Amino acid sequence: MAGRYFGTDGIRGRANKFPMTAEIAMKVGMAAGLSFQRGSHRHRVVLGKDTRLSGYMIENALVAGLCAAGMDVFLLGPIPTPAVAMLVRSLRADIGVMISASHNPYHDNGIKLFGPDGYKLSDEIEERIEAMLDQDVEAMLADSDGLGRAKRVDGVHDRYIEFAKRTLPRSMSLSGLRIVVDCANGAAYKVAPAALWELGAEVIAINVEPNGFNINDECGSTHPAGLQKKVHEVRADIGIALDGDADRVVIVDENGTVVDGDQIMALIAQSWQQSGRLAGGGVVATVMSNLGLERFLGDINLELHRTKVGDRYVVEHMRAHGLNIGGEQSGHIVLTDYSTTGDGLVAALQVLACIKRSNKPMSELSRTFEPVPQLLKNVRFNGGKPLEETLVKAAIEDGRNRLGKTGRLVIRPSGTEPLIRVMAEGDDPQLVETVVNDIVGVISESRSAA
């Protein structure tokens, strides 16, 4: 669902421009606050953010709207998105709010909302909130004596660190492992290195000096080159790259090779299957996950369930069908035994547990399957609906026919940017590249191209 305000992962855009303005943030606070009032108790919200400069503006605007709706606001400061989801339940809050644009550059920001159960909101609830943003809700707001209060909450980092550590067996130590962790100058810059160190590892932390502008700047899960270099430099056993709000993770093995979300899911699924912990007989991933993952899971008698892109849809399918491992190739890994949303640190800890149990290097564990050649390209467009144009439709149909049954073609608009994503995969890499380039060329020449 992509409405006027909400996309595939909350509201997101360039800070101080529609829809990420202080005015709209205040309206979101009002609408969300009014939507989650249940009974006569004092209603409370937990509100976290990452390290972007615009977080101060958005935070204050949201607080104004939430307090106007009669909600007490617990300000958490910079903290990972999964920590907000965890603290909604831990603090018995009515709603959780995270201010972040995830892996996007500093000049973007976003608002993610969680219900009292710690899960992201359904399409229906988002639609209800979105409808209220264009309404006059003044008559529904709190009376003067019913306004909410806002206060900073201490100790939330310690709560999250302890939560993350408890996802490993109490007897397990990470001693003997040298770990480089890249925190992307983002929300996990304090908690991730601390959790790994407290578990016994030797920790080399990089990109842990946020200044409001350097979040995700040539670092983190979308830019692992710096991590690869550092792993080589210090001869680390493994590198862990988080993104700006730490809900996704990418691993680098001791040789500097990048391990994506598909390989991470395969490793954890195989480990959990062997220990009897895997639920539902399979894994949930999106249409973007590699065909190699699907084949590998089939070989060990597991099923790959595919959803549309967005970890929210992955989680919805997991809950509906009783599966406990899911995620995205980009590194959103959801382990519902522990978390209600993607958690980069918790997923990394499960990978580290596999290393400790097997006493094998990451390079040996990470190639659980050979990826099928896959190519993804983005095409920027300027308004319009390029995917509805006749020539574009014809090019896509031709591409599907050429790939046949041994490949896949996925064409979709981005939920957060004016981009068309064109992805193809198949056993013939030359054919895959030709198909993608042909479709990208037709879209680029369409009337809607930027």
Image (cartoon, grey):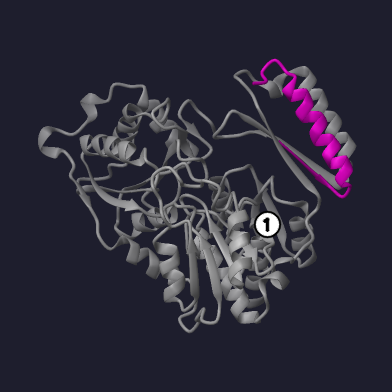
Q: Which residue is situated farthest in the bottom direction here?
A: 171
Answer with the quarter of the image where residue 249 lies: bottom right
Residue 262 within the segment the image draws in magenta: no
Using the image, determine if residue 118 lies above or below residue 157: above
Residue found at x 84% / y 47%: 426
* Percent of width and height locating residue 309: 62, 42
Q: Quadrant of the N terminus?
A: top right
Q: Which residue is situated farthest in the front direction here?
A: 233
* Percent of width and height locating residue 390: 77, 18
Q: Which sits in the foreground, 289 or 92?
A: 289
Using the image, determine if residue 129 lies above or below residue 120: above
Secondary structure found at label 1: helix
Residue 438 within the segment the image draws in magenta: yes
Q: Quadrant of the C terminus?
A: top right
Tell whether 326 sits left or right of 152: right
> Is residue 385 something that shows in the picture?
yes
Tell whether 272 sits left or right of 170: right
Residue type at mark 1: give it: Asp
> Is residue 166 something that shows in the picture?
no
Q: Which portion, as a residue range, is magenta?
A: 422-450
Which residue does the numbered mark 1 point to in the structure image?
A: 262
* Percent of width and height locating residue 137: 27, 25
Residue found at x 54% / y 34%: 416
